[in-house]
Amino acid sequence: MKCRKCKREVVDAPYCCQCGAKQSVAGGNRKPKSRGNGHGSVYKRGNTWQAEIMLGWKIDPETGNKKKDVRTKGGFPRKSDALDYIPVLKLQKQEESKKIISTLRDHWQGYSNGQMTKLSANKQLTYRIAFSRLKSLENKPIDVITINDLQRQVDEQTESYYPARDMKVLLSHLYKRGMAQQEVTVNLSKFIVLPELEEKEPVPFTEAELKKLWADYGEGHKLTGYILLMTYSGMMPGELFKAKKEMVDWQNQRIIGCGLKTKKRKETPIVVANLVLPVLKDLCESTKGEYLLDMNRNDFYDAFHETLTRCKIDDRTPYVCRHTTATALSLGNIAPDIIREVMRHNNFSTTERYIHKEIDTAPMLDAVNKMPNCKE
């Protein structure tokens, strides 16, 4: 017989006389492995067999732990069937290694020419602006981009909540396409941390900003008409959502019955300036149904921020419209009691919180008609 270690001829003895190795081992004579490392494995799950090969190692983006990256195929009735499928799994692995991974731009082109075309023109423009902020990443394969890359890009390109949110939502759409094509397994966009949403005190629109809004409305953007209506009437967002077409008194240029919160606002009509009266008529004619605005609150707020982005106006909340009304009237030397009536406040001390005299918006008065019905 031969020594199990040095392979020299030895007599029938428990130890080799040449190297001293013990000739018997625990477990007796074992069969050598039929498949070594890297050759795949099979195991039973329930009543069927499963084939498995290891592709490598990967980092779990949620826990940061290292774990095996495997490919499996189950449902085989016999062990031999699972063994026969291992070469197929290995072939799939080889084909994947040759596959060209799409870049962010590739997925953007697919999304912008397909699913995105079903969105509103405002939303499409918002996403185009968001993608322009991904310029340094657009030509990278989607599977090599890290969460740190995405977070760094968002932090560098945006300073406020809404533009950052637009980037995050767009990236989510692109990653979903990557997952559908099996190029990535995790939607990394969900790990992007957005800036805090800071509800700052509204700063009235300037004359230059109002001109941009009028030009935008003139180009056919109906949503901008609602912004102008609120700005030239002091209407609150909630009142806009409540307003019905039948509430408009066209002869006296006022809207009756949509006031909110206080008794004063509920009882006092909203007066409509001459300049914005044609806008109100256009909105009534172009919307369906009984309400003046045919969209829900969330869609309106999204569209409002998209409009400011498109017009290159600093982001604000819709309440900026009401603050613009009070400020413009004050700078035009309109009597405080008249301003209070336009704003539908009980006390002028409340109205004063809407007046921002430090803002140079005096020229806006030329765009805001005097409202004679306010004195009634």
Image (tube, helix red, strand yellow):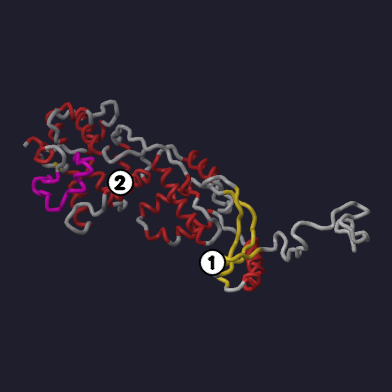
Which SS class for mark 2? helix
- Classify 42 as above or below 141: below
Q: Position of residue 139 (x, y in %)?
A: 57, 52
Q: Describe residue 29's horizontal placement relative to residue 313 as left or right.
A: right
| Residue 197 visible (yes or no) | yes
Q: Which residue is mark 1?
A: 46
232 within the magenta span: yes
Task: Give the quadrant of the N terminus.
Answer: bottom right
Task: Give the quadrant of the C terminus.
Answer: top left
Callout 1, which amino acid?
Answer: Gly
Q: Residues within 10 Å of mark 2 (few under 14, many from 20)?
A: some
Looking at the rendered image, the disc whose residue lies closer to the viewer, 2 or 1, is: 1
Q: Position of residue 2 (x, y in %)?
A: 90, 62
- Classify 228 as above or below 27: above
| Residue 215 visible (yes or no) | no
Quadrant for residue 47, please give it.
Answer: bottom right
Q: Which residue is mark 2?
A: 301
Quadrant for residue 265, please give it.
Answer: top left
Distance CA(mark 2)–CA(mark 1): 53 Å
Which SS class for mark 1? loop
Q: Which residues are magenta?
A: 231-258
Q: Describe residue 164's horizontal placement relative to residue 299 as left or right.
A: right
| Residue in front for this viewpoint, 83 or 96 | 83
Callout 2, which amino acid?
Answer: Tyr
